[in-house]
Amino acid sequence: MIVVTLPYPISANRYWATRVVTPKGGRPMAMTYVTPEAKKYKEQVGWLMRAAGVRQPLQGRVEVDIKLYPHRPLDWAKRAKADPLYWADSVQRLDLDNCRKVVNDALKDIVFGDDKCIWRDSGEVMEPDGREACLVVTITPIVK
């Protein structure tokens, strides 16, 4: 099992970009690419995974669990007083599904060969607890 705290992921809107290219003598076509910001995030993930002892991608099926910790706003106490149970619902954060796409792409070729190796996938948005916004990912090989 691998458990690593990663930086808060970038938005999927900033991870991939699309532009229209027109080859010489050809028809215009849309091209989707990974942005420089995404490459930097993937590089950070790679360094953190190597620091955690990951030297090569795991073989076979894996389970990926994500705990997303959003930034706690300065007015969190006021929000908590007004709505003790659900104050964190109003905190600006990434959508969990888009976060999962970005993180899985960043882990690809570092922790697992391809995201088709992910057989179980879970995630949870955590209540902001004062730590810097981050993501805790747990990757567990599935052994039969």
Image (cartoon, helix red, strand yellow):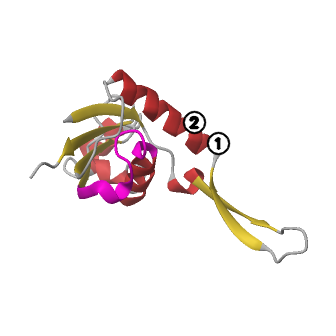
Mark 2 surroundings within 10 Å by alpha-carbon count, few (fewer than 14), some (14 through 19), many (20 or more): few
Q: Determine whether label 1 and label 2 are within 8 Å by CB.
A: yes
Q: Label 2: which residue?
A: 40
Q: What element carries label 2?
A: helix
| Image: 108 above or below 101 | above
Q: Where is residue 135 in the image (x, y as percent from the top left)?
A: 34, 39
Q: Label 1: which residue?
A: 36
Cα distance between the residues tagged 1 and 2: 6 Å
Residue 46 in view: yes
Total marks shown come to: 2
Residue at the right extreme of this rendering = 25
Residue at point 26% right, 43% down? Answer: 127
Residue at point 33% right, 28% down? Answer: 131
Residue at the left extreme of this rendering = 144
Observer-nearest of 115 and 65: 115
Q: Position of residue 1 (x, y in %)?
A: 19, 36
The magenta-colored residue range is 106-120
| Image: 43 above or below 30 | above
Q: Position of residue 49 (x, y in %)?
A: 37, 30
Report the amino acid beneath label 2.
Answer: Lys
Q: Position of residue 119 (x, y in %)?
A: 23, 59
Report the amino acid beneath label 1.
Answer: Pro
